[in-house]
Amino acid sequence: MTIKITRNVKPDFTDERGEIIKLLDDGKTTIKSVLLIKSKKGAIRANHYHKEDAHYAYMVYGSMEYTEQPIDGNGKKETVVVKEGDLVYTPPMVAHAMHFLEDSAFLALALKSRHQEAYESDTVRVKLI
């Protein structure tokens, strides 16, 4: 398995007013939850996997080391640095963890609802990093 990352997402439209950046428009994906998550330098997040949910993480600013490993034992642990403008996809049943290299903010675009009860029932905690 290779981490599914889109580097440095470019604007689809630019004019004197600014830019429009299309993060996701495949016609198939239904986003149920959008979260803006801010993290301080050195913070570690995730260290879990989702049984059914999948999500995209778009780095608004800052950077993180993103680590993932399939839980089926058929893949090795991989780590990439995610920087401002990068988009990374995490499928279900893939353990993932985030270590923030500087103060950062990212958008989490989830395919399932993230209200607390649904989130907790779908999340399995692990120690990836």
Image (cartoon, grey):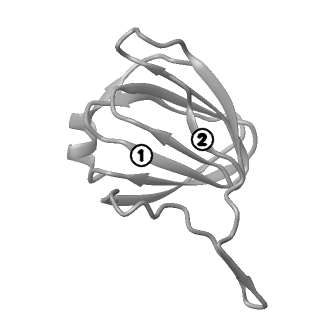
Q: Mark 2 points at which residue?
A: 5
Q: Residue 48 location, x and y as percent?
A: 41, 27
Q: Is residue 44 above or below residue 119?
A: above
Residue found at the very far bottom of the displayed protein: 16
Looking at the picture, which amino acid does disc 1 mark?
His
Residue found at the very far top of the displayed protein: 73
Q: Residue at x 45, y 58 (%)?
A: 35
Q: Which mark, residue 55?
A: 1
Q: In this view, does 11 lie above or below 54?
A: below
Corner quadrant of residue 44: top right
Q: How crowded is mark 1: few (under 14 residues within 10 Å), some or many (20 or more)?
A: many
Q: Is residue 28 left or right of residue 83?
A: left
Q: Residue 27 location, x and y as percent?
A: 36, 63
Marked residue nearer the N-terminal end (1 or 2): 2
Corner quadrant of residue 5: top right
From the viewer's side, name the closer residue of 82 and 39.
82
Q: Which residue is drawn at 32% across and 51% down?
A: 111
Q: In this view, does 72 lie to the left or right of 4?
A: left
From the viewer's side, name the closer residue of 65 and 77.
77
Q: Residue 59 location, x and y as percent?
A: 63, 52
Q: Residue at x 31, y 59 (%)?
A: 30
Q: Residue at x 65, y 72 (%)?
A: 12
Looking at the picture, which amino acid does disc 2 mark?
Ile
**What's the distance in space between the residues labelled 1 and 2, CA to CA?**
12 Å
From the viewer's side, name the closer residue of 41 and 20.
20
Q: Which secondary structure lies at badge 2? A: strand
